């Protein structure tokens, strides 16, 4: 019960972070398309319901049945149903990221279809786990479906890793060779990894705890937080769009085209740009751009002849 209580406390803190992020989202992105707002509301509400369920479960064991050890063996319905909302929230967020893979990969049916199959498999296994667990009365009986529990965590972790790896590889292939544009891509890659690392780490930690100590509830302290990490990573991705876009606008030395799903949400209108069009990062090349292009070749010559950077010619470059 101690592990479950720790999980509830951490989940409550993460839910507070989730509410703050939701507030910032609705304050900053009032023009987002309706279904993105609906996804935000759905994940936040499911997150709150999940917190209510796990709080009810812990209260039932440590308060309502205080000093009643026999009751600790009996499953309460709320500790089973919470898994349903964790699975649904995880599936929603992973599907959102898969849509970005779809757009960035220029509609790669094979890759996107494979990821969707993993998501559906994870959600299906999670639903099956809830149905089977609802028919059981004790935690000893719950051990019978431990292999299914391990499968759910393994599938979830695999899906997160494949999504993050796919986005990073495609962004890496979009490199231009220019230092500043590659810096933007590096930031995007780091951001993608950071938003997925917590969910993946938490799922792996729950998996290790379950395998190493299947007769205890240590894994619950990690499992209770997985859904919260999914919601927070989803909201962090949406809230970071303006900051990343401003970083792109500040870097003016070339022209680069990225799919809208990388920097903005699907079908989000910003000024005269629409999400169906590639975001155009328009650059008027100055001496800075030329230095990036010829620096390695000209630095020795400049040193020998004593020419300054101001002597370099300027031209326009469009990529």
Image (cartoon, rainbow, N blue to C red):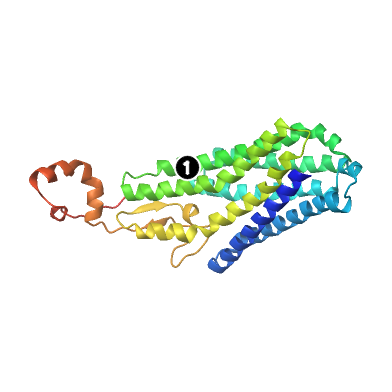
Query: Is 270 rendered above or below residue 237?
Result: below
| Residue drawn at point x = 68 percent, y = 52 percent | 11
Q: Quadrant of the N terminus?
A: top right
Query: Is 19 rendered above or below residue 89?
Result: below
| Residue drawn at point x = 56 percent, y = 38 percent | 162
Query: Is 277 rendered above or below residue 196?
Result: below
Pick the residue in front: 106 or 154: 154
Residue 114, percent across and down? Answer: 60, 38
Which residue carries the number 1 mark?
Answer: 168
State the residue lying farthest toward the left.
Answer: 305
Residue 109, percent across and down? Answer: 55, 41
Residue 183, percent across and down? Answer: 37, 48
Label 1 environment density (alpha carbons within 10 Å; few <14, some 14–19, many ≥20): many
For the residue labelled by badge 1, is the local secondary structure a helix, a strand or a loop?
Answer: helix
Tell me if 284 is positioned left or right of 183 in this view: left
| Residue drawn at point x = 63 percent, y = 42 percent | 202
| Residue drawn at point x = 50 percent, y = 57 percent | 240
Tell me if 107 is positioned left or right of 84 in this view: left
State the residue lying farthest toward the front.
Answer: 67
Pick the residue in front: 127 or 23: 23
Does the image show residue 113?
no
Tell me if 19 is positioned left or right of 246 in this view: right
Q: Give the number of callouts.
A: 1
Does the image show residue 144?
yes
Residue 28, percent across and down? Answer: 53, 67
């Amino acid at each position: 019960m101690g592990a479950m209580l720790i999980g509830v406390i951490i989940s409550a803190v993460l839910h507070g972070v989730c509410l703050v992020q939701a507030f910032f989202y609705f304050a900053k992105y009032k023009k987002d398309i309706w279904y993105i707002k609906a996804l935000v509301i759905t994940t936040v509400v499911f997150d709150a319901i999940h917190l209510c369920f796990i709080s009810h479960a812990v209260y039932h064991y440590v308060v309502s049945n205080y000093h009643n050890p026999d009751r600790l063996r009996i499953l309460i319905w709320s500790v089973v149903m919470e898994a349903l909302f964790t699975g649904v929230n995880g599936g929603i967020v992973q599907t959102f990221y898969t849509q970005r893979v779809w757009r960035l990969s220029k509609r790669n049916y094979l890759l996107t279809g494979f990821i969707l199959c993993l998501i559906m498999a994870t959600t299906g296994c999670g639903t099956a786990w809830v149905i089977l667990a609802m028919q059981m009365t004790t935690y000893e009986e719950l051990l019978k479906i431990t292999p299914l529990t391990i499968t759910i965590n393994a599938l979830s972790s695999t899906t997160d890793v494949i999504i993050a790896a796919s986005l990073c590889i495609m962004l890496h292939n979009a490199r231009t060779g220019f230092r500043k544009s590659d810096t933007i891509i590096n930031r995007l890659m780091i951001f993608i990894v950071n938003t997925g690392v917590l969910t993946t780490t938490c799922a792996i930690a729950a998996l290790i705890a379950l395998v190493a100590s299947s007769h205890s509830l240590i894994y619950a302290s990690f499992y209770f937080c997985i859904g919260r990490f999914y919601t927070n990573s989803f909201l962090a991705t949406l809230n970071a769009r303006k900051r990343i876009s401003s970083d792109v606008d500040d870097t003016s030395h070339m022209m680069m085209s990225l799919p809208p799903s990388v920097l903005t949400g699907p079908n989000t209108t910003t000024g005269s740009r629409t999400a169906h069009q590639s975001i155009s990062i328009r650059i008027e090349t100055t001496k800075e751009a030329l230095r990036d292009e010829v620096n390695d070749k000209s630095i020795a010559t400049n040193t020998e002849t004593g020419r300054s950077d101001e002597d370099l010619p300027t031209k326009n470059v469009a990529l």
